[in-house]
Image (cartoon, coloured by chain):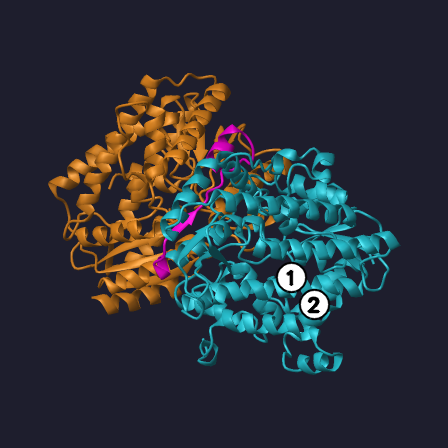
Amino acid sequence: MRKETREYKFDWMLWTMFDAGAKIKKGFPKEYSHSLNYMPYFRGVIEPMLATGDPGQKFIECCAAYLDNLVHSRDKGFKTAITTFCFSPAILYAMDIVPVCLEILSVMQTLTGKRGTAEHLDYCNEVGYTETSCSSQRGSLGGYLAGNGAEIDMIVTDTPGVCDTNANAFAFAAAYLDKPFFSLDMPPELNGVRSDAYHLGDFRALIAFLEKHTGKKLDIDKLREIMQRIQKQDELVAELEDLARLRPSPMPVTFNFMVHASRFLFAGMPECTVCLESMLAVAKENAAAGRSGLSSGVEKLRSFWCYIDHYTQNLRLWQMLERNNICYQGNILSRSWAANAPHVKEYGTEAAAYELDLSTLDSMILGMALLNSRMPMIKSIRGPYDAKNMWLEDTVNLAKLHGADFIVYNGTPGCRNTWGMVKMFARDTEKAGFPTYIMYADAFDDRVESWEATQERFEEFLTVRGLL
Amino acid sequence: MKEEFREASAVLENKWVKKWKEGGGKVVGYTCSYVPDEIFYAAGILPYRVRGFGAEAMTIGDTYFGPFICSLPKCMLQLAGQGGFDFLDGVIITPGCDSMRRLDECWRKMGDDAGAHMPAFHFHFGVPHKFTDYSVTWFIEETRRLVAEVERHFNVTITNEKLGEAIRVHNKTRLLLERFDAIRSQADPPISGTDALAVILAGTTMPRDDYNSLLGELVGELEQGGERLAGRARLMLVGSASDDVELVRLIEGDRALVVADNLCFGTRFYSNLVNEEGDPVEELAKRSLAHNDCPRMYGEYRDRLNRLINKAGKARVQGVILQNIRFCDLHGSENGLFERDLEKAGIPCMRLEREYGPIVESGRMRMRIDAFLERIV
């Protein structure tokens, strides 16, 4: 790692950038354009985000608020826990713990930094972590292993049984940094008495762990308040999903990204509600006018991403979709729903969703346990891909629901789990009528395959399959 | 060393399997040491640990698995697709790791495509990643589910008495292998690491009563003495699944001896006894899950480190080879931690990344091992 990189803590650097980004549009237009010159590697993100209007502004503010909590956690009396995107942060907020979400921090760096996360990725390898591990965690884990980030108190994850390379990143960090560690474990089946009992027992153990390491008892009223907000946020997300089914889809391409990122950062917190409400207002307005969310106003194709996005610098994935008039109908990251969502009922997949009952502490804990067990990825890639409620069924249902014209797989070479099944999975989605493209890029590391090559291959797929 | 061990460890359908099948016996394969093979003994079925050695290509493996996957399950699939496991009447896949658990779908889909090579009995056996009261409860139920499915499919009855007998027989193996371990740990031991691995591997591919009998004889002979292997550097082999005696032969050469290991196909296979009192299914489940030697049991690193340090001390090893198959992130990363902490404890380490399958890079590996031996001797 270069000496200069160690000069400032990396999460503090991110905070200053997002904090400035959240204020930049509040001045005069000339001030705005002038200020952009001071953030040459961030303007490619800030400009398209802010171009979406209020939702983009709210989203940048949301990111800035999250980073503010993170870098000032000690001053604000919070503990910190390194965690993962598919772990609902709500229980952490209920215990006054700031979730240090590695994947989100990696995305923030890849989107905004000239060198992306390269130095952190490589630092992990220097201290013994394998280079073949997933870049999503390594991208920011390297900063914490190097002591170049906020103080960390504990490490919690929920991916054993779902994703080895993810779980392993957190176990490695705990051993390397000598921090308390807890992992929620996931049995292969999502539903059933045994799975429910396991999820519940595990979640109770998590609460005991958090209480031990914060020295605080779980505050029932605070938990209820957070869960009420989650219910509200679920309603907003359900409405956005419903609107996305319209033709043309009124959702701008970046909305899906902003929906799931808001939830990963602030599920159950007011900041997330504000973002979702703002997006819903724009989507409703577009829908009322029969307008496509694409900036060209012309929707040619509808894409469904069965795994994750590609977080190369300057939102180039989304720009490419825009250029080709392809709307973005979601990916695995936004697939976590309450059982009362209309589209869940329509497809009869309530069992793969969660119910929140706020009547008693026990019912709330059960609700949180089930919510966590149905987080993106956690719910659908734990068992065989062709089993009930698993990846194939989930994907095909959603692709149909959203009227997708094709499906795209993108991940990282570190994703041992999906690479173990994606070839057969794609064969089955093709059989179900969806042209399916497997990208071999790394969502977090352009060095694996340049964006230019990734884009060329993607567009070639569209051409060869006669989609464009 | 007895030739029987060599054959049982190096031939897929060895003479024991053939004899078993000729007698009308059933054989069920499994992929992970977390499967309690006592269940099959109690059912009168031969449990057989599926392996990947001998695969000479990866064409079938690469057809179903993606490119960034460990070569061990790919080799297993390759062999399966070539009919190498057609003698199996059943197969059990566990989520030992992500690469291995996807052997489930790959084997099934390959079987569908080929219209062959898929055993009639197939079972996905879930194994939790932690040892707690609720995970043990879940795992006991999972083990009961396996018992019930074996009974149903093979039309057998697995009584508690039969399970109790199976546990006693398997515990006898474990006790014999503990004595065998003690022999390996002696100064100038009478057996090489290469032969020791063959002896241990044979236990996973031949009938247990025959194995115990042969093993008892061998241990008795070795305890009486024998030709000593003197003047060699003492090594411990740690890391990814390693069932190829040729890898150990390469490591040992004529200058070293692998006197201890912490491998899934090695000592992890027989460590810890099953409690012979109480409900047998519960005791089997508890023994299997209490195994935290594998890095799949997250958050147990310190225990594993302490165990390695103790083992290294007992066996008086001069160095540890920390190997991992490429894309085996669990062992690969933990090897990084072991290297840091074992070196801190004064135990020299060497990390070695490799591919599973035919050893095509023996020159590189030999050179690195020689350099390591120069450092420690």
Q: Which residue does the numbered mark 2 point to in the structure image?
A: A316
The residue furthest left is B224
Q: Is residue B147 left or right of residue A113?
A: left
User: Disc 2 residue type?
Assistant: Arg
Q: Quadrant of the N terminus of chain A?
A: bottom left
User: Pointer 1 and pointer 2: residues touching (CB < 8 Å)?
Assistant: yes
For disc 1, the neighbor class at 10 Å (few under 14, some 14 to 19, many from 20) is: many
Q: CA distance from mark 1 to mark 2?
A: 8 Å
Give residue A390's quadrant in the image: top right
Secondary structure beneath label 2: helix
Residue at the spot 16% in from the left edge and 59% down from the top edge: B231
Q: Is residue B165 left or right of residue B331?
A: left
Chain A: give its colour.
cyan
Query: For the magenta stretch, what is the residue range?
Result: A175-199
Give residue B336's quadrant in the image: bottom left
Residue A186 — which label? none
Residue at the spot 40% in from the left edge and 29% down from the top edge: B140
Q: Is residue B364 left or right of residue A192?
A: left
Q: Is residue A34 above or below residue B118?
A: below
Q: Is residue A118 above or below residue A252?
A: below
Q: Is residue A86 visible?
A: yes
Give residue B160's quadrant in the image: top left
Q: Nearer the viewer, residue A307 or A280?
A: A280
Q: Which residue does the numbered mark 1 point to in the structure image?
A: A310
Q: x, y percentage for residue B147?
A: 43, 24
Chain B: give its colour.
orange
The question of residue B157 being in magenta is answered with no
Q: Is residue B327 visible?
A: no
Mark 2, chain letter? A
Q: x, y percentage for residue A157?
A: 47, 50
